[in-house]
Image: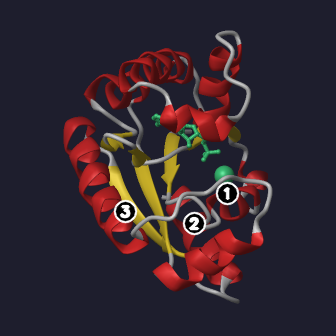
Amino acid sequence: MSIVIVTGVPGVGKSTVMNAAKDFGYNIVNFGTTMFEEAQKEGVSNRDDLRKLPVDVQKRLQKQAGEKIGQMDNVIVDTHASILTPSGYLPGLPEWTVKAIMPNTIVLVEALPEEIENRRSKDTSRARDKDDIGLHQRINREYAIAAAFMTGATVGFVPNNDNKIEIAVEKFKKILNK
Ligand code: AMP
Ligand code: MG
């Protein structure tokens, strides 16, 4: 089997797409949850506060999580190609993290900025930022490609447009079936 990293801006629906492909024999691991479990020991009480922590703290937590996940096999990793911090876009898969994980494939789940904006406004369970979604998705492509270049991973795109979830799931399954 293999290691597949799934990325996408907050609110694009990557968890929904991934969960629909659970019957493929992969375990799903959430990078943010792995980081948050470590951060809670240091007094962080909300996962949406992680990206506001000092960048060096985020990088330390990221490194710990990456090393933990790097020991796993047959996993789909739910994470981000970039994280919008107050200091700019932090790569979610910097060299030391992506090389610890050595993914076979990096998937980008994408949608139109206005679709994502609308989904975010309906999800009251999360503290989303007001940001430039189009720019964030472009940065994600660049960072995902850089991570692919360091590891030889393939890069796949899954468009998750409104009322087209079944197309997104089909596309994702095709990528898993490679
Ligand atoms: P999520 O629930 O997927 O949005 O993840 C929660 C938080 O975990 C994100 O807002 C980030 O602060 C952090 N996180 C997730 N993946 C990464 C990563 N690869 N590198 C750094 N931080 C991450
Ligand atoms: Mg999610």
Which residue does the numbered mark 1 point to in the structure image? 18
Q: Secondary structure at mark 2?
A: helix
Q: Amino acid at mark 1?
A: Met
Question: Dots 1 and 2: beta carbons under 8 Å?
Answer: yes
Horizontally, residue 152 falls left or right of residue 100, namely: left
Residue drawn at the location 21% of the way across and 46% of the way down: 146
Q: Is residue 117 above or below residue 74?
A: below
Which residue does the numbered mark 3 point to in the structure image? 136
The part of the image, by quadrant, that contains residue 57 is top left
Within 10 Å of the Cα at label 1, are there few (<14), some (14-19), or many (20+) other Cα atoms? some
Q: Is residue 95 above or below residue 155?
A: above
Which residue does the numbered mark 2 point to in the structure image? 172
Horizontally, residue 83 falls left or right of residue 35, namely: left
On the image, the x and y values in percent for residue 139 come to: 29, 59
Instruction: Report whether the residue tagged 3 is closer than 8 Å to ligand 1.
Output: no
Residue drawn at the location 67% of the way across and 64% of the way down: 17
The part of the image, by quadrant, that contains residue 30 is top right
| Closest to the observer, 170 or 91 | 91
Q: Amino acid at mark 3?
A: His
